């Protein structure tokens, strides 16, 4: 076998993780649901003038979905996926902390709602990535109602 044939076979093997049409459809659906729901939550935050907006929420949701989708696709046991979830949750905590600002001259803290929405968006992405799309949609709808309807009085 010529070297270029070996290279081509290696490239094919590296891209074989999608498998059949069922796998491709499942992955596309889960990732699409994660991105769309993250986008809806991010759009609401961006329209409210929050520091983390549309793209941030979309990326958080997509990344969270991918972090659980890949181990599940590889056949990892759900008990082992729980360790992945712990890492994602901790990492999102650091990301959310970056959205929280304390005003120097006042006892005023801003960004807690945005940090919470980033955290929740990660959970929505995880739900979508694990195949619980209905739970992801329902949770995102609850979050949108909370963010759009329940407003704190401005000082």
Image (spheres, grey):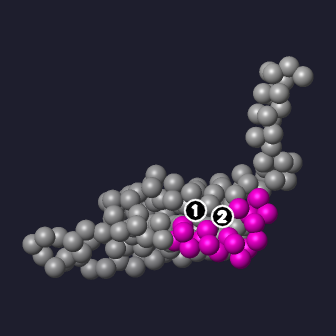
User: What is the number of the mark on residue 68?
Assistant: 2
* Front in this rendered view, residue 130 or 71: 71
Above/below status of 60 relative to 80? above
Using residue 72 as the reference point, say whether residue 32 is left or right of it.
left
Residue 148 image offset from top left, x and y in percent: 42, 71
Q: Determine if residue 95 is in view.
A: yes
**Which residue is at 9% across, 72% downward?**
105
Say which element carries label 1.
helix
- Say which quarter of the image contains residue 101: bottom left
Q: Residues within 10 Å of mark 2 (few under 14, many from 20)?
A: many
Above/below status of 79 relative to 24? below
Using residue 151 as the reference point, say whether residue 87 is left or right of it.
right
What segment carries the magenta color? 71-89
Residue 101 magenta: no
Q: Tell me whether circle 1 and circle 2 mark residues in contact (CB < 8 Å).
A: yes
**Which residue is at 75% across, 66% downward?**
76
**Which residue is at 76% across, 59% downward?**
73
């Amino acid at each position: 076998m010529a070297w270029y044939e070996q290279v081509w076979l290696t490239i094919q093997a590296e891209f074989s993780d999608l498998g059949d049409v069922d796998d491709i459809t499942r992955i596309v659906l889960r990732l699409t649901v994660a991105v769309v729901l993250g986008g809806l939550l991010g759009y609401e935050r961006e329209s409210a003038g929050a520091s983390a907006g549309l793209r941030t929420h979309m990326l958080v949701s997509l990344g969270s979905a991918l972090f659980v989708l890949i181990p599940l696709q590889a056949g990892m046991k759900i008990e082992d996926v729980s360790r992945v979830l712990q890492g994602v949750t901790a990492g999102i905590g650091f990301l959310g902390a970056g959205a929280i600002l304390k005003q120097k001259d006042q006892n005023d803290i801003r960004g807690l709602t945005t940090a919470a929405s980033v955290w929740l968006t990660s959970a929505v992405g995880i739900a979508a990535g694990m195949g619980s799309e209905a739970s992801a949609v329902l949770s995102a709808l609850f979050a949108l109602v909370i963010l759009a309807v329940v407003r704190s009085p401005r000082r």
